[in-house]
């Protein structure tokens, strides 16, 4: 059973030879390869090679062409500020509080901003790995993209002051995610993860999620499936207990859950969906390898009876994470 | 329902429309009502104490760790800011607030929603808050603490790389002769750690919890 087969079987809740290891290693791959984050985020070829090396190092089952949450806004003209060892920040928003999103045109993924960096990385990774391991792309979900276009506070105030305008921004962001996601599938991604951190109950109430975000996320996932994705994956960090049950209706085959929820709670809310999680991101920095290993083994045991589990972190593993802690997570599987 | 009040029933009635506008988060109405109160001869201090602080107290009672509606708090915060702009178009002067705090998110961290809420809550409680924004170097924050005569330094941290920067704050303050100025931390990354691990005086669970600590500190009450 190779890495991709293992993951595909897990997404269908079928038996696997061992739990797939799919930690959210993004910028950490740059650190492992001795690259600055700035270079990693601008050079698709370098990103691809760094991802492949990180996979070899920790013997994981997947590689990711995830850049950062500035990509979509930048492709529409937002100004970003980069640093050598930090993710970029949107410094000039595309839309002012009173602007109508109708004036935006969908970007061309082949040429807009750094979208080509992602596409290039996917092409290279797929060429190198073929169908031996999961090659995953990434898009920002509608709420996160809208937050990056307006600035998160302005976007949230629109929910109260001018709901139709926010709805228009969310609709535009939905089309944006679909277009960028389909381009990633064309470039060789097996699947495209939809990240929507700003849709988290840490930010918007669950009622808002159900009414405004769930239908649009559903459209994104359906379009990706229609575009040939091997499966769909929704990734929202934070305390998602109040929304996780709707992921099944939204059409997510894989659902990420963060450390705020236990494995039992997540399984109860999504009994027939493959779950990915939920090691605490910060533990990869500060905790001892033994702690990470114990937590990882606990998770594997918790899903033992049910299957449908990808061992991962609840959010990104910080770029500066201790290698020993990531290795400890992998070691937890090898001793099964 | 109204809480216990110091200024007598007539003032309470006069300020009720302002408190109501604040609590429903109507920033335009709140600003207009505040303007009207000033024109009626109320002092700015009275509007802060009987309007803003009273409304904040009521919101505070409602917001427990379990029930915390971010959007609702942001709307109240926006209304508070609108009233503060009516009262003090250039912000609270250093001599006007109950005390001055400096706040920032540190270098490399772009999350600022939480920081902005803390700023608004404290402004609503009558404090002057100097906001250095996000992606702020430790030295700039310490420099501001010195310049502004800050009664406390506040940091909000959502991503892990800021942890090591937070640990540099106290030594940097000490080097400027500000060893007595407490450091209060909050935000998703920092609140996973204990005060000793961050070398700070207090780690707040949420904005109101932090505000309680700061109120105790400023009033000289025991903080633990
Ligand atoms: C929204 C969000 C974003 C938005 C931020 C928009 C903005 N302008 O703020 C966007 C999409 C841009 C974003 C980007 C990223 N994010 Co983000 N994001 C979130 C999310 C979902 C919510 C954060 C939030 O706003 N919460 C709401 C506010 C109100 O809560 P709060 O900040 O905790 O504040 C409250 C209290 O803590 C307190 N408080 C806060 N500060 C202070 C300070 C003091 C003094 C006091 C008294 C109180 C106090 O008061 C507030 C009200 O009570 C969290 C998940 C989570 N559960 O927190 C991830 C999260 C913070 N993000 C994370 C990550 C990894 C990122 C990225 C690095 C992803 C990437 N690879 O690009 C980038 C960051 C880039 C950078 N350089 O910083 C991780 C951080 C992991 C880690 N430990 O390092 C988190 C924790 C997800 C997770 N579960 O792991 N993100």
Image: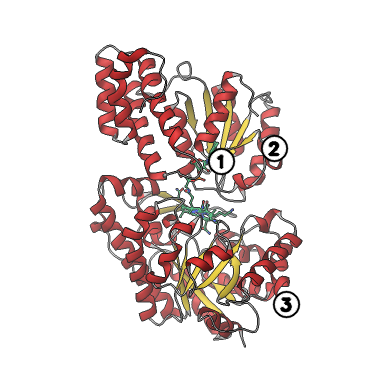
Residue at disc 3, secondary structure: loop
Total numbered badges shown on the rendered structure? 3
Is B133 placed left or right of A181 in the picture?
A: right
- Residue at coordinates 33% horizontally, 31% vertically from top-left? B22
Q: Which mark is residue B54?
A: none
Residue B7 is drawn in which quadrant? top left
Relative to residue A139, is residue B54 depicted above or below?
A: above
Q: Chain of mark 2?
A: B
Disc 3 target residue: A336
Relative to residue B185, is residue A70 depicted above or below?
A: below
Ranked by sequence position, the earlier of labels 1 and 2 is: 2
Q: Which mark is residue B199?
A: 2
Is A234 placed left or right of B102 in the picture?
A: left
Q: CA distance from mark 1 to mark 2?
A: 17 Å
Q: Chain of mark 3?
A: A
Residue B18 is drawn in which quadrant? top left
Residue at disc 1, secondary structure: loop
Same subunit, tags 2 and 3: no
Residue at disc 2, secondary structure: loop
Q: Nearer the viewer, residue A320 or A78?
A: A320
The answer to whether marks 1 and 2 mark residues whose Cβ atoms lie closer than 8 Å is: no
Disc 1 target residue: B205
Classify 10 Å Cα crowding around label 3: few (below 14), some (14-19), many (20 and above). few
Q: Nearer the viewer, residue A67 or B60?
A: B60
Would you say the beta carbon of the disc 1 residue lies within 8 angstroms of ligand 1? yes
Relative image position of residue A231 (x, y in whole percent): 45, 79
Q: Quadrant for the N terminus of chain A, please.
A: bottom right
Residue A78 in view in this figure = no
Relative to residue A237, is residue A203 depicted above or below?
A: above
């Amino acid at each position: 059973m190779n890495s991709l087969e293992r993951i595909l079987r897990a997404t269908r809740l079928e038996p696997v030879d061992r739990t797939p290891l799919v930690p959210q290693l993004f910028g950490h791959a740059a650190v492992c390869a001795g690259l600055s984050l700035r270079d990693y985020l601008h050079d698709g070829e370098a990103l691809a090679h760094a991802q492949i090396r990180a996979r070899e190092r920790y013997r994981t089952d997947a590689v990711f062409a995830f850049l950062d949450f500035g990509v979509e806004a930048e492709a529409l003209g937002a100004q970003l500020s980069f640093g050598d060892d930090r993710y970029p920040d949107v410094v000039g928003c595309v839309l002012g509080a009173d602007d109508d999103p109708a004036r935006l045109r969908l970007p061309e993924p082949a040429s807009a901003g750094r979208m080509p960096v992602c596409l290039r990385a996917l092409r290279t990774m797929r060429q190198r790995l073929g169908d031996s391991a999961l090659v995953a792309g990434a898009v920002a979900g509608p709420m996160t993209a809208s937050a990056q276009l307006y600035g998160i506070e302005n976007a949230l105030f629109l929910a109260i002051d001018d709901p139709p305008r926010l709805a228009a921004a969310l609709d535009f962001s939905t089309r944006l995610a679909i277009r960028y996601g389909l381009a990633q599938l064309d470039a060789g991604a097996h699947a495209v993860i939809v990240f929507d951190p700003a849709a988290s109950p840490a930010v918007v109430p669950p009622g808002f999620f159900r009414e405004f975000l769930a239908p649009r996320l559903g459209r994104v996932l359906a379009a990706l499936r229609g575009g040939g994705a091997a499966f769909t994956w929704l990734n929202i960090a934070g305390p998602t207990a109040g929304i996780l049950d709707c992921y099944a209706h939204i059409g997510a085959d894989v659902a990420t859950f963060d450390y705020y929820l236990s494995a039992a709670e997540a399984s109860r809310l999504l009994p027939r969906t493959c779950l990915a999680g939920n090691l605490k991101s910060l533990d990869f920095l500060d905790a001892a390898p033994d702690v990470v290993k114990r937590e990882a083994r606990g998770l594997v045991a918790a899903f033992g009876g049910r299957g449908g589990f990808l061992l991962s972190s609840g959010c990104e593993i910080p770029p500066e994470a201790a290698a020993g802690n990531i290795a400890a997570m992998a070691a937890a599987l090898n001793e099964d | 329902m109204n809480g216990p009040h110091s200024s007598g029933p007539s003032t309470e009635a006069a300020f009720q429309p302002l408190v109501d506008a604040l609590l429903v988060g109507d920033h335009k109405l709140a600003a207009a009502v505040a303007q009207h109160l000033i024109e009626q001869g109320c002092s700015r201090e009275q509007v802060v104490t009987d309007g803003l602080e009273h409304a904040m107290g009521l919101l505070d009672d409602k917001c427990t760790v379990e029930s915390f509606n971010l959007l609702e708090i942001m709307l109240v915060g926006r209304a508070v800011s609108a009233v503060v702009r009516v009262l003090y178009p250039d912000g609270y002067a250093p001599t006007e607030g109950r005390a001055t705090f400096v706040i920032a998110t540190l270098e490399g961290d772009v999350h600022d929603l939480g920081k902005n809420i803390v700023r608004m809550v404290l402004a609503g409680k009558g404090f002057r808050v100097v906001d250095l924004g996000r992606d702020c170097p430790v030295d700039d924050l310490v420099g501001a603490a010195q310049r502004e005569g800050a009664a406390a330094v506040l940091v909000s941290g959502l991503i892990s790389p800021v942890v090591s920067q937070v640990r540099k704050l106290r030594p940097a303050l000490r080097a400027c002769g500000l060893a007595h100025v407490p450091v209060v931390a909050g935000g998703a990354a920092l609140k996973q750690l204990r005060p000793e691990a961050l070398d700070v005086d207090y780690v707040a669970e949420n904005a109101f919890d932090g505000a309680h600590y700061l109120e105790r500190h400023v009033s000289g009450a025991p903080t633990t």
